[in-house]
Image (cartoon, grey):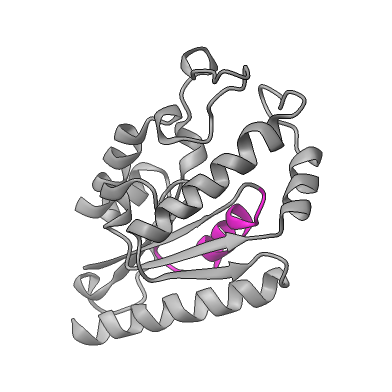
Amino acid sequence: MKTLVVGVGGMTNGGKSTLSKSLHQQIANSCLIAQDSYFKDDSVVPMDSNGFKQYDMLDALHMDTMMCEVDSWRRDPEAFLRQRGLNPEHTTPSVDEEVYVLIVEGFLIFNHRPLNELFYKRYFMEIPYDVCKRRRSLRVYTPPDPPGYFDGHVWPMYLKNRQEIESMASGIVFLDGLKPKEELLTAVCNYVCQEKEKLMEEA
């Protein structure tokens, strides 16, 4: 069997989760791992000098646990799917010719070098500041964002993290999160399916 790891990153509320879930639904033998599932408990996330919890940094996440999950999938994607109650969809005569796709989604997936090095393709969802702030204000978080959190922590950290990935990650395709969801899904899905076909032909 062959594997393909695709990263869907981007800013908060930029549409990366929506795109990733839709990709997972469209692509056979795919699996989705979301970075938001690995946040540390609020009690251990440090505060900055302004009293803002430092959630928008890698230290706020159990990245070792996330990497263990990714490595487990890479070792045996079929077993990984079965363990989670998902049945692989065999579309070719031989199981050895199957191509399994892992979609990794998250706001800091390209900032973690060991994870970033695994991606065959990298997508980054982005939207303007005002749209991002408005969408963020409409979301309910646990714990909730304190007053001034977006401008005092979220946006500055996004700019910092964005600058970091531009210096360490090559080949990132930046996507306009304001475009219709269907248009973005079609573009990314077509690419992934084409790469799956290429890998199957090489088998």
Q: Which residues are magenta?
A: 13-30
Quick one: which residue is furthest to the front in this view? 49
Say left or right for 180 vs 52. right
Relative height, residue 192 to residue 44 (above, below) = below
Q: Main secondary structure of the magenta part?
A: helix
Task: Give x and y (percent) for residue 70.
Answer: 31, 47
In the image shown, does 19 or 130 lie closer to the viewer? 130
Quick one: which residue is furthest to the top in this view? 43
Say left or right for 96 vs 140. left
Residue beneath the point at 46% across and 35% down: 57
> Residue 4: in sight, yes or no?
yes
Residue 91 quadrant? bottom left
Residue beneath the point at 45% across and 46% down: 108
Say left or right for 197 vs 155. left
Where's the N terminus, which quadrant? bottom left
Residue 78 quadrant? bottom left
Q: Residue 24 in magenta?
A: yes
Q: How many marks?
A: 0
Q: Residue 21 in magenta?
A: yes
Task: Give x and y (percent) for residue 158.
Answer: 56, 46
> Residue 107: in sight, yes or no?
no
Relative height, residue 103 to residue 140 (above, below) = below
Task: Give x and y (percent) for residue 17.
Answer: 59, 53
Where's the C terminus, which quadrant? bottom left
Task: Give x and y (percent) for residue 55.
Answer: 53, 30
